[in-house]
Image (cartoon, helix red, strand yellow):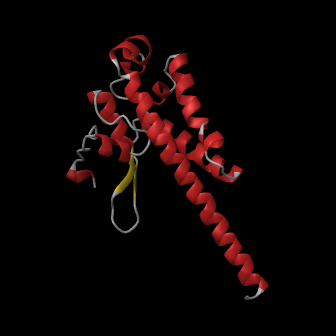
Amino acid sequence: MGTPRARAAAKRFFEANRLTSRCHGDAAWQSVAEYAWHRAMHSRFAYARWHKAHHAYASPCVWCDLCIHPLEALGYYVILYSPAFVIPMPKASFLAYICVMGVAGVLDHSGVDVAVRARGCGVAVYDTKFHDLHHARFNVNYAFPFDFIDRACGTYAEIKRDARAG
């Protein structure tokens, strides 16, 4: 069965893995629901009444993340907090998920260039320029914060980077 020390290490490893996988599940659930809500906010009816103020900022700044109509905010916050009610999870997973989503929301509207790449392959799993392009072009890159749902739904637009910027 192993030593008590080895059993304790294995338990910590599996608990950390469980927390991480729950956080990924939360983010995937949220990304799909957020995409649908954001696409709805771009319908002619909803855009004119609620979402237009948010797009007054063609080049996002940190404050435009908060520049949304109360009805739009209600939808976003129901989606943001829904994993706690839909997906059984430990409190630590939910707190990690909320922290990631909060930081991503601010970064997406900060004008700061941040790209997080998968280890080993260099593929971006998160890039703030993704949402900047949505504000510039309006009809692409609706997802938040990960682009997989835009890729699946055909609304993904490639981020062009200056080769000199690295």
Q: Is residue 18 visible?
A: yes
Query: Could you say which is closer to the camera, residue 151 or residue 69?
Result: 151
Tell me how many marks there are. Answer: 0
Image location (x, y in percent) of residue 28: 48, 47
Position of 7 compared to 105: left or right? right
Residue at image x 43%, y 39%? 144
Query: Could you say which is closer to the camera, residue 127 or residue 110?
Result: 127
Q: Residue furthest top?
A: 49
Quarter of the image for residue 134 reads top left
Query: Could you say which is closer to the camera, residue 137 or residue 40?
Result: 40
Q: Residue furthest right?
A: 4
Quarter of the image for residue 81 reads top right
The quadrant of the image that shows the C terminus is bottom left
Q: Is residue 61 visible?
A: no
Image location (x, y in percent) of residue 135: 33, 29
Image location (x, y in percent) of residue 77: 57, 30
| Above-or-below relation of 98 to 117 | above
Residue at image x 24%, y 47%? 161
Residue at image x 53%, y 17%? 71
The quadrant of the image that shows the N terminus is bottom right
Position of 64 compared to 55: left or right? right
Residue at image x 37%, y 69%? 120
| Above-or-below relation of 119 to 65 | below
Quarter of the image for residue 116 reads bottom left
Position of 148 compared to 154: left or right? right
Image location (x, y in percent) of residue 129: 34, 41
Query: Could you say which is closer to the camera, residue 148 or residue 67?
Result: 148
